[in-house]
Image (cartoon, rainbow, N blue to C red):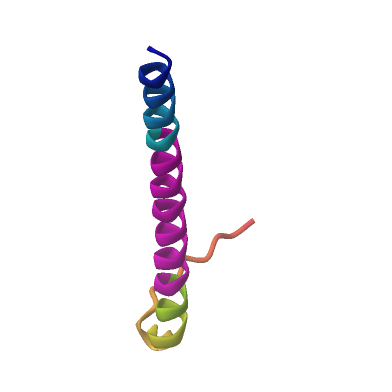
Amino acid sequence: MIDEIFDRQYQAGRDALNASIASAFARFSRAFGNAFHVLNKIEYEAPWNARSKPSRCN
């Protein structure tokens, strides 16, 4: 009986731990991908291809 309760709590704890690790890895991957995308855009964006913003008169 005690072994079953311990096993249930252990399995629930392992599930929570694995879920938090997977969540942290997903957030890190998303942040790394975003940083790579921004740096790649900065590096390879040609300034002459950028659209100019229309001037506004005040």
Q: Does the magenta run of residues contain 1?
A: no
Quadrant where the image shows the C terminus:
bottom right
Read off the magenta span: 16-37
Residue 10 against residue 48 in the figure, above or below: above
User: Where is residue 29 shown, x and y percent of the image?
Assistant: 40, 61
> Is residue 29 shown above or below 12?
below
Q: Position of residue 20 (x, y in %)?
A: 45, 42
- The residue that appears at 44% across and 48% down in the rendered structure is 21
Q: Main secondary structure of the magenta part?
A: helix
Count of numbered marks = 0
| The stretch drawn in magenta includes residue 17 | yes
Q: Residue furthest top?
A: 1
Q: Quadrant of the N terminus?
A: top left
Q: Is residue 10 left or right of residue 55?
A: left
Residue for point 47% across, 50% down? 24
Q: Residue at x 37, y 35 (%)?
A: 15
- Write down the quadrant of residue 49 in the picture: bottom left
Residue farthest to the right? 58
